[in-house]
């Protein structure tokens, strides 16, 4: 598996989830406007999490790796295995 630093994973995950939550919340608002917020949150998460895990995060991870050249070994970042 290529080296993927923790701060980059955090950034990629945030960039995938934040727009999904905003879009899904906006779409659901007319249907769930009178619902208690815990139910709206559960429904939003039930839609966002599978889409983020199966589609958005892998897509953004591939884009990150392509942009940064993440598949190449970089001296000093990946310890040598003996």
Image (cartoon, rainbow, N blue to C red):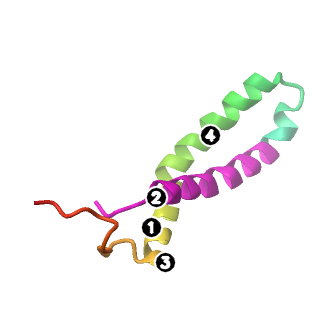
In the picture, measured across the screen, residue 67 lies left or right of residue 82, that is right
Do the numbered discs 1 and 2 sit on residues whose CB atoms are within 8 Å? yes
The answer to which image quadrant residue 47 occupies is top right
Separation of disc 3 and disc 2 at Cα? 14 Å
According to the picture, the residue beneath numbered tag 2 turns out to be 58
According to the picture, the residue beneath numbered tag 3 turns out to be 67
According to the picture, the residue beneath numbered tag 1 turns out to be 62
Do the numbered discs 4 and 1 sit on residues whose CB atoms are within 8 Å? no
Q: Tag on residue 47?
A: 4
**x then y, percent, for residue 11:** 58, 57
Mark 3 secondary-structure assignment: helix
In the picture, measured across the screen, residue 45 lies left or right of residue 74, that is right
Residue at 52% from the left image edge and 63% from the top image edge? 60
Closer to us: mark 3 or mark 2? 3
Instruction: Answer with mark 4 or mark 1, whichever residue precedes in sequence.
Output: 4
Q: Quadrant of the C terminus?
A: bottom left
Residue at 53% from the left image edge and 42% from the top image edge? 50
**x then y, percent, for residue 69:** 40, 77
Q: Residues within 10 Å of mark 3 (few under 14, many from 20)?
A: few
* Span of residues in magenta: 1-27
Closer to us: mark 4 or mark 2? 2
Separation of disc 3 and disc 1 at Cα? 9 Å
Q: Residues within 10 Å of mark 1 (few under 14, many from 20)?
A: some
């Amino acid at each position: 598996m290529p080296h993927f630093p923790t701060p980059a994973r955090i950034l990629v995950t945030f960039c995938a989830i934040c727009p999904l939550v905003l879009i899904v919340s906006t779409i659901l608002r007319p249907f769930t406007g009178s619902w208690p917020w815990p139910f709206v949150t559960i429904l939003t998460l039930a839609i966002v999490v599978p889409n983020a895990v199966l589609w958005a995060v892998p897509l953004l991870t591939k884009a990150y790796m392509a942009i940064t050249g993440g598949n190449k070994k970089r001296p000093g970042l990946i310890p040598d295995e003996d």
